Amino acid sequence: MVFNSDSLILSAKSLGFSRLGVVALDADDSLREEMARFKGWLTAGYGGDMGYLARHQELRANPKTLFKRPAGVCRAIVVTMDYLPATAHPNWRDEDSSALKQPDRAVISVYAQGRDYHKILRRRLTALARLLSEQAGHAGQAEHTYQFRACVDSAPVLEIALAQRCGLGWRGKHTLLLNREQGSMFFLGVLLTDMPISEIYCEPALPESPDGHCGTCRQCMSACPTQAFVTPYQLDARRCISYLTIEHSGTIPVPLRGLMGNRVYGCDDCQQVCPWNRFARVASVQDFEVRNGLDQALLVELFSWSETEFTRRHQGSVILRIGYLQWLRNIAIAMGNSLARPDCPPPLRQELLAALGTRADSESEMLREHIHWAIAQARVQA
C-alpha cells in the first residue's frame, strides 16, 4: 500500500478529529479479556434497563463480523474529538461546580449542550472513509472496493478497549477513557475497514502504563453524588445520574431523587474533579458550541416549555432522545431538591411551587408522581 501515516492523520485532523490510532484485529483476536469483564458487569445487573447491551455479544467479540461481506483483515481506526465549548470559562470545572450550588439553575452535562455528537462524528467518519477510498484509487487500488463502517455508539463495538490498544489512553477509575493530552472531555469514534492499513499509522504518543495513570487518586469515585462506583473501574449504572436522567424512562427510586440535586440531563461530577481534565481541550468543531443558553439554564424556564418548544429547541440535540415527559420528570426532581434546600429564597420557592402546580394534573401518572413528590419537598423544608 502507498498510504502513509502523515496523510491519514492530516485527513483526520482536517475533519476535526484531535487524535487518531489504528489497530489491526486479527482473525484470532476476539477481545476475550474485555468481553469477560463486560459479561461479568452485565451478569451483576449493573447495566440496569439497558438490555440492548446484552445483545449481539458475538459482534462485540469479533468486530469484523459487522461487515456485509467476509473480510480477511479488519482494522479499527479510532479517533477522538474534543467537545469542551470554545465559550467555556478557563476555570470551567469550578464554574460548573458552582452551578450545582444555585437553586434556580438547571445543570446539563457539557457534552449535551451543543449538537448531537452521534451525527457529527458519524458524518465525519464517513468523510474520512471517502478520503481513504479516494487515496486507494490514486494508489492504483481502484478495482478493489473496500468496506467501511462508522461506529459512534451505534454498533456493538468495544470503543474504549480498541482506543487503549491504539495507545490513545487508559480507562480511568470513572470508567471513561483518559489521556495526558485531553483528559476525558472528548468523544470516541471508530471506523472499521478491511483496507489493509498498517498499524504504523498510530499517532505518536507518550507510552501509556498498562494500569493507567490514576495512581491512588479516587477523587472521581468520592465525588459521585449517588456513590455509583462499586469499585475502581466499575460503575453500577442503576445509581448513576447520567443513567437515571437519560437511559431510565420510568419512575426514579425515591432514595436517589434527593441525591440528584439540580442535574436534569447527565452528570459531569466525576470529570469535573479529575486532575487530568485540567488538560481538557476546547473543541475545534463549532457544532459543540452551547445552544439555547443551556450552560446558564433556569429550572422554571425549562419547565415552562411546551412539547412543541421542547422539540423545536432541541432539534439536532442529543437531549431530544429522552422525550418531553422524561425531560419534565428530570426538571421536577431538580425543582423538588431546590425546594428542600434551606438556602432557597422565598420568592424562588413560590416561583417553583407555582410552576409545579401548572402540571400537577398531568395525564402522565409517572410525571404526576414526581411532581407531587417535588411539591412535598417544600413542606419537608418548612
Image (spheres, rainbow, N blue to C red):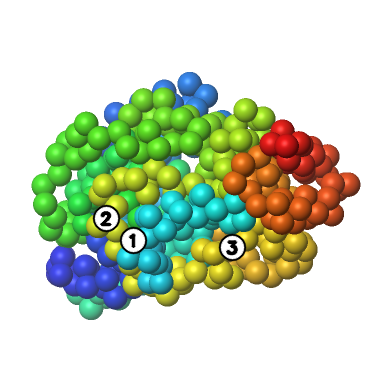
User: Could you tell me residue 101's position as x and y percent?
Assistant: 51, 49
- Which mark is on residue 278? 2
**Vertical comparison of 54 with 345: above or below:** above
Q: Residues within 10 Å of mark 2 (few under 14, many from 20)?
A: some
Asked if residue 247 can be seen in this view, the reply is: no
User: Could you tell me residue 153's position as x and y percent?
Assistant: 46, 50
Earlier along the polypeptide chain: callout 2 or callout 1? 1
Foreground mark, 2 or 1, reads 1
What is the quadrant of the C terminus in the image?
top right
* Separation of marks 1 and 3 at Cα, in angstroms: 19 Å
Looking at the rendered structure, the kind of residue marked 3 is Ala
* Separation of marks 3 and 2 at Cα, in angstroms: 24 Å
Earlier along the polypeptide chain: callout 3 or callout 2? 2
Secondary element at image label 1: loop
Camera-side residue of 351 and 369: 351
User: Could you tell me residue 198's position as x and y percent?
Assistant: 16, 57
Q: Which residue is mark 3?
A: 297
Secondary element at image label 2: helix
CB atoms at circles 3 and 2 under 8 Å apart?
no
Q: Which residue is mark 1?
A: 91
Camera-side residue of 104 and 141: 104
Secondary element at image label 3: loop
Camera-side residue of 382 and 30: 382
Residue at x 73%, y 40% (from the top left corner): 378
